[in-house]
Image (cartoon, helix red, strand yellow):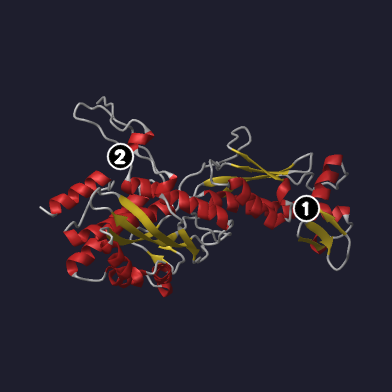
Amino acid sequence: MFTNTSPVGAYRGAGRPEGNYYMERLIDTAARQMGIDRIELRRANQIQPDALPYAAPSAQTYDSGDFPAVLDRALHRADWDGFAARRADSRRRGRLRGLGLGQYLEATAPPSQEMGGIRFEANGDVTIITGTLDYGQGHATAFAQVLADRLGLPFARIRLLQGDSDQLLAGGGSGGSRSIMSSGSAIVAAAAEVVERGRQIAAHLLEAAASDIEFNDGRFSIAGTDRSITLLDMAARLRAGVALPEGTPASLDVALVEKSPPSAFPNGCHVAEIEIDPDTGEVFLDRYETVNDFGVLVNPLLVQGQLHGGIMQGLGQALLENTHYDESGQLLSGSFMDYAMPRADHGIGFGFASLPAPARTNVLGVKGCGEAGCAGSLPAIMNAVVDALAEHGVTHIDMPATPQRVWQALREARG
C-alpha cells in the first residue's frame, strides 16, 4: 500500500529497551495485583552470582554479573527508604510523587568479523584502521587507549582511520554496542602481531636470539642487558631501508581479520523519582540514579556520556515524543518542537555508579554501553509515573505520558 506515514527504523537499542519495558512494567503490575513488594518480587527471581555462567532459555549464556548487588547499590544510592518522607512533602505542596525502578540486561551484538589494522606512518604517527564507525561515541580516544596500553605508544601519536572501503579487509560498522568489543579485540590481536614482528626484527638489529628479546612499554630489549630499541625508532629504521635477513618481516604494519567475540551482557538498575502537577498533568524528573555493570571501563567519562545520552533518549520516548496524525492523515508533529524532543531542562544530574563484573567473553573484559541508558530509563520513568498516579486508581498509562494524557487519566479516575 501507499502511505504518507513516517517510516520506522532501528532506534537506540533496536527493540531491547521496549522488551525490557514490557518486562519491568509487568513485574510492577504483578506485584501490585498480588500485594507483594515490587523489590522483593524482583529479588525472588534474580539469577544469583553462584549460578553463573547461566544458560538462559534464549540459548544465550550469561557469563558474568552480580544482579542482586547492582539492585541493592541502586536502592541505597536512590535513598529508596526515604521516599515516604519526600512523598509527604510533595503532598503538602499539592503535587504527586512517584518512585520507579527499571533493571535491565542486554545482549550486545552477535559475533561477526572485524579488521585489526595498524600502520606506522612516515611522520611517526601510528594509524588504527577499523571497520566500526564513530558517530559521536569517542572511538578515537578509546581505541587509542587500547593500542597505547598494548604497545606503549604515545597517545598523541595515534590516529584513527575508519569506514574507508578501499583499505578495509572486513568491518561490520557500529551497532548493538559492539564497537569496543569487536574493534578492541581486533586491535589487541593486531598489536600482538606487531610485537611478534618487532621481536624478530629486534633480534637482527640488536644481534641477539629472538627468544632473548623482551618487549615492554614500547621498547624491545635484550633480556638482562641495557641494549634496546623503541618501537617507533624501529619503524623509522625500517622506512630508511635497513637490510634484513631473509624471512625477517620487512614492516611492522599489520592488517588482519579477527572474528569478533560472542555477545556480552551489560546490565544495571535505574531508579527514577518524579513529581506530577495534577492541575496540568506535567511530569517533572526530580531524582535519578543508576548502577551499571559494563564490565571493564576503558574510558569512564565516555561511558557516562553514552549513559546520559541513552537516558535522555529514553526520557523523550517515555514522556514527550509522539508522531501524531489527524483523521485526514495530516502530520501534526512535523517539527521537533511539535514532536517534542527532550531538551536540556528536561534532564537533571543523572547519578552514575559502576559495579563491574568483567566479561569472560572477550580479551578486554568489556560489555558495551551505548544502548543501556535507554533500556533502563523507559521502565524506570514510566514505573515512577504509574506509582504517582496509583493513589488515584490509575494503574497504567501508555507512553508517552504527556501532560494531556496524565491530566486526562486523573480526570477519568476521579470520575
Task: Judge whether residue 370 can be spotted in this image.
Answer: no
Q: Which of 202 and 155 lies nearest the eye of the viewer?
A: 155
Choose between 394 and 247: the one closer to the eye. Answer: 394
Q: Are marks 2 and 1 in contact (CB under 8 Å)?
A: no
Q: Residue visible at 64% across and 54% down?
A: 146
Q: As drawn, is 219 to the left or to the right of 144?
A: right
Image quadrant in which you'd find residue 342: top left
> Does residue 141 appear to the left or right of 307 in the view shown?
right
Using the numbered discs, state the Cα–Cα distance from disc 2 to disc 1 in whole angstroms. Answer: 57 Å
Task: Tell me if residue 107 can be seen.
Answer: yes
- Residue assigned mark 2: 322
Mark 2 vs mark 1: give the one in front. 2
Q: Residue at x 27, y 63 (%)?
A: 92
Identity of the residue furthest to the top in this view: 2
Q: Could you tell me which residue is drawn at 46 percent across and 62 percent down?
A: 292
Q: Position of residue 243 (x, y in %)?
A: 88, 44
Residue topped by disc 1: 198
Check the image and report above or below for 126 versus 33. Answer: above
Residue 56 shown left or right of residue 292 in the figure: left
Could you say which is closer to the camera, residue 42 or residue 383?
A: 383
Q: Which three-letter amino acid code belongs to the residue tagged 1?
A: Gly
Disc 1 element: helix
Nearer-N-terminus badge (2/1)? 1
Q: Secondary structure at mark 2?
A: loop
Residue 247 image point, x, y percent:
80, 48
Q: Is residue 57 above or below residue 68?
A: above
Which residue extends farthest front?
93
What residue type is disc 2 on? Asn
Q: Position of residue 255 (x, y in %)?
A: 66, 43
165 sits to left or right of 13? right
Q: Quadrant of the N terminus?
A: top left
